[in-house]
Image: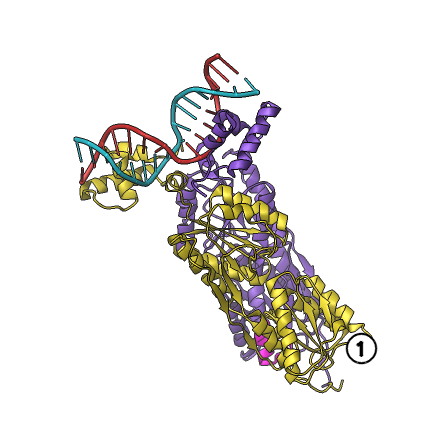
Chain colours: A purple, B yellow, C cyan, D red
DNA sequence: CTGTTAGCGCCTTCAT
DNA sequence: ATGAAGGCGCTAACAG
């Protein structure tokens, strides 16, 4: 047990200097075979493990990246994180993850911690795209990559999905199935995904000469409960929609639950499609057509971008923006006749 | 930008010594109001943020805990992690998360990193409960808490669920609905959840005087695909089961998908229940009865245990074991007559 | 090839 | 109430 062995202990044990030990520990070469063997033996004997803290201190790098997302229990984010973590670990970077719970204040706290801690890079899906919670962090010159939501105040590399295209396709799909009174459950309009998906919806209506109706636009907050509430509202309208497009996965789940509770039969009485695939989509009768994206892929790209910035810091290099195209998974969700029960 | 300000810069700016600055930064008191104000001003002016690395170096603590789970895209784990991270952040601890992908080797790599990095504590759901991948880590005397799976080689605090009780209830439920040829899709038998849930199954059969049939026991690996395959196998048997119990969430999803593809109607032709609730359970017709547990709660408890060990290190304090009782969510999944189509 | 040594930024006695 | 100075463990010149 005792104190942990240090590089000095190893040096003594092997009868060499710390510099030489450092050389073999860091595989820098230039050490005689025999000496190296002796050092390795000493390391083994003393159970020496290099202290990364001390190393970071002098190297001024922590080999750690910070990740901030709103909620890691949302499958979308857990997959994105997984992609980041995977790519990072392959490059010998650690990943510190924190949930902001969509709170700008919490996000700022976390950023402050990251700053003290000294992360080498940051991947963030911010709680507020127009806020100034990164002001302090930005002064540090630590590379930042925004994922899924932009950081409007700052010039940083950004990884997004084709939000507008995706929702356009999904809504157009409903139109092609013959639906006309199409409602949208929107996400927060101050977020890129919320706004862009709404724009895609508008574009689809417009392209097909459908007049947009104010009352068919209802607002959720990307959480399940709001999806549920929105459907309740739409269902009880004087003149309900004949189809609904939901702006994200969690709201889709809530929406579908509400429809079930209301006995509002998808595919028969009402059409449905949504952004981001959900497990349930396959099990509904009929199956649901959804917009799908490569979430782990988004995470990987985010890390790649960050990696480049970490390796070649050059604040003048213009920001890059990567937009990953989503795809529409068309399932057997055509409009159909009511079943004979 | 220039170099980051250090404690020395602040000291100079405020015309005091580093010791005094350190005192106010760490809120140790014993500094004249006026001096403190001057220091605070200097900190503000220089955008000083304390370097946690240097601090860790001398304090010998990192305020960081490591978490290793097999796969964070599994909703069970993402929720457990969320619980841990939440509790940790409230106590000003950071959480480093890594996926082992069920690989013992990967796990060892991660542990080595954690060791070098110097985490203050570790929460782990190990890839191999009987392996020796923690041997090196254990020598360090860093507190460890096992979650969901035990670490048989070592005496560490452990947080588990009532695996046996949960599956017992779920299987008994099937029996009470009138099913008799009940198959089980098992998880890996070298894991606590895999083994214990199987035991619960056996106990339920036994208690109700049902003979266990070898051929109704099929093995999965806790992943979705294996659940799918197992159902295929069971369905095509000469004498298929009349009900199936699945040992975890992902396999349940695979199983239900297979049943759908096979047109093997749950609730009509075959009964079904499983361990860990899944979103789809609510949408199936009939709804699925599942074992449910408080996942974020598990994470919180794990951190609490770890916290105690970190605060009061005392290797002689006996290990604690916490077992959180799961609950059976009984949904309308009774055996019923075949629909008239 | 190998050794010496000066920090990295901070905390913490020990003095004053 | 404040300052001075010795490390924490390691890396990176710079010397031999």
Please, is residue A290 above or below residue B51 in the view? Answer: below
Q: Residue at x 64, y 64 (%)?
A: B250
Residue A260 forms part of the magenta stretch: yes
Q: Is residue D4 left or right of residue A158?
A: left
Q: Quadrant of the N terminus of chain B?
A: top left
Q: Quadrant of the C terminus of chain B?
A: bottom right
Please, is residue B148 above or below residue A149 in the view? Answer: below
| x and y, in percent, of residue B291 in the image | 58, 73
| x and y, in percent, of residue B87 in the image | 43, 59
Chain letter behind tag 1 = B
Residue A86 forms part of the magenta stretch: no
Residue B310 in view of the camera: yes
Question: Which residue is the extreme one toward the right?
Answer: B238
Q: Residue at x 52, y 62 (%)?
A: A187
Q: Is residue A293 left or right of residue B159?
A: right
Q: Secondary structure at mark 1?
A: loop
Q: Dot 1 surroundings within 10 Å: few (below 14), some, or many (20 or more)?
A: few
Which one is nearer the viewer's eye here, B59 or B139?
Answer: B139
Please, is residue C11 above or below residue B184 in the view? Answer: above
Q: Which residue is mark 1?
A: B239
Which one is nearer the viewer's eye here, A236 or C3?
Answer: C3
Q: Quadrant of residue B281?
A: bottom right
* Range shown magenta: A256-265
């Amino acid at each position: 047990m005792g104190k942990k062995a240090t590089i000095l202990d190893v040096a003594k044990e092997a009868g060499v200097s710390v510099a030489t030990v450092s050389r073999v520990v860091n595989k820098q070469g230039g050490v005689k075979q025999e000496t190296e063997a002796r050092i390795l033996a000493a390391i083994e004997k003393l159970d020496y493990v290099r202290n990364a803290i001390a190393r970071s201190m002098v190297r001024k790098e922590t080999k750690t990246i910070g990740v901030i997302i709103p909620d890691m229990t949302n499958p979308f984010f857990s997959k994105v994180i997984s992609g980041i973590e995977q790519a990072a670990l392959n490059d010998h970077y650690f990943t510190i993850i924190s949930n902001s719970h969509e709170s700008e204040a919490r996000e700022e706290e976390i950023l402050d911690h990251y700053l003290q801690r000294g992360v080498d890079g940051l991947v963030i899906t911010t709680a507020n795209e127009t806020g100034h919670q990164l002001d302090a962090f930005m002064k540090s010159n630590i590379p930042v990559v925004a994922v899924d939501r932009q950081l409007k105040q700052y010039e940083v590399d950004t990884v997004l999905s084709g939000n507008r295209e995706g929702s356009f396709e999904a809504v157009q799909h409903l139109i092609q199935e013959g639906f006309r009174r199409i409602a949208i459950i929107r996400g927060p309009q101050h977020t890129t995904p919320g706004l862009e998906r709404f724009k895609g919806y508008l574009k689809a209506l417009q392209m097909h000469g459908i007049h947009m109706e104010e009352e068919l636009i209802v607002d959720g907050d990307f959480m399940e409960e709001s999806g549920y509430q929105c459907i309740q509202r739409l269902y009880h309208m004087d003149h309900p929609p004949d189809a609904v497009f939901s702006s994200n996965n969690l709201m889709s789940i809530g929406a579908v639950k509400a429809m079930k509770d209301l006995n509002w039969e998808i595919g028969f009485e009402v059409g449905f499609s949504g952004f981001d695939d959900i497990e349930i989509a396959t099990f509904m009768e009929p199956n649901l057509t959804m917009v799908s994206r490569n979430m782990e892929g988004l995470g990987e790209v985010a890390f790649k971008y960050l990696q480049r910035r970490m390796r070649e810091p050059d604040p003048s290099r213009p920001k890059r923006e990567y937009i990953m195209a989503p795809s529409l998974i068309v399932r057997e969700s055509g409009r159909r006749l009511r079943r004979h029960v």
